[in-house]
Image (cartoon, coloured by chain):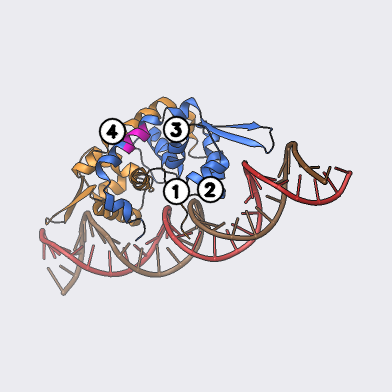
Chain colours: A blue, B orange, C brown, D red
Amino acid sequence: MMKEFNLCPRFEKAMGLLSTRWVGLILFDLLNGTKRFSEMEADLPISGRLLSDRLKMLEKEGIVERNIYSEFPVRIEYSLSKKGKELEPVIKEIQSWADQHVTHEEVAEKDA
Amino acid sequence: MMKEFNLCPRFEKAMGLLSTRWVGLILFDLLNGTKRFSEMEADLPISGRLLSDRLKMLEKEGIVERNIYSEFPVRIEYSLSKKGKELEPVIKEIQSWADQHVTHEEVAEKDA
DNA sequence: ATAATTAATTACAATTAGTAACTTAATATC
DNA sequence: GATATTAAGTTACTAATTGTAATTAATTAT
């Protein structure tokens, strides 16, 4: 039996996307411009398997666009769609909150 | 060996919090005011085990405050701290994006 | 004491994430 | 044409997290 709940279905859907692990960082990375797979793999603390899963998911959601260039070697570029770029205010607000409230110590203690 | 990456440590920390499953919905719920445990359990599609975990985590992060009232039966209230309330712009931007981009069909297909 | 009520915790099954090796696809070089 | 090279993506496996349901505090009214 399905549990009933009803805060706001649209918010829940959006939050479901954004709270999928690594999606925020992928968006952050792509807001800096088009990237290829291996660049993103280098920028982000994420393995190829999950990066591939997430990009596929974001493409299906219409947030990310994938373009193939038949060069040698093949180049595949990922970028944000209009819908994806419109997440920029969300990312900016998170950045702003982080700048105000995340302390140096909190950042450091990632190791611990 | 630890993988190197360096987009923005503060952003990564904030995004790590916000992308922890259910945290967004918990914040959304608490932005409507103080709630007790059982209310939140009813509002959200989340079980007591995880709600308890998340509230403890958010309290440790200084985002949520917990107050005990020794009545019968005991009443424990959760609310947002200043730091927590300052996440409101983030939640509002997500809501705004959701209103613009999440379609009726996407909301419906939760069942599928 | 006993019952009643809210807030948690525990135990365990199911799902999801992380790691590293492997495969695919395209084309350059011999 | 066979082999090598390079980026992209997948597979197989282990580890961590989540979800569910039952159980345990803790408090106090009766």
Quote the CA–CA distance across marks 4 and 2: 29 Å
Q: CA distance from mark 1 to mark 2?
A: 16 Å
Q: Crowdedness of circle 2 by 10 Å Cα count: few (<14), some, many (20+)?
A: few
Which residue is tagged 2? A50
Which element carries disc 1, helix, strand or loop?
loop
Residue type for callout 2: Leu
Mark 3: which amino acid? Leu
Residue D30 drawn above or below residue A63? below
Q: Are marks 1 and 2 on the same chain?
A: no
How far apart marks 1 and 3 lie (CA) works out to 17 Å
Callouts 4 and 1 on one subunit: yes
Q: Which mark is residue A31?
A: 3
The quarter in which the C terminus of chain A is drawn is: bottom left
Write down the region rendered in magenta. A90-95
On the question of residue A38 being in view, the answer is yes
The residue to which callout 4 is attached is: B89
Q: What residue is at 47 percent from the left and 35 percent from the top?
A: A30
- Depth check, mark 3 against mark 4: the one in front is 3
**In front here: D25 or B20?**
B20
Parent chain of label 3: A
Residue A92 among those drawn in magenta:
yes
Residue lying at 30% horizontally and 55% vertically, measured from the top left: B52
Q: Secondary structure at mark 3?
A: loop
Q: What crowding class fits label 3: few (fewer than 14 Cα within 10 Å), some (14-19), or many (20 or more)?
A: some
What separation in Å lies between label 2 and label 3 (alpha carbons)? 19 Å
The quarter holding residue C1 reads bottom left
Camera-nearest label, 4 or 1: 1
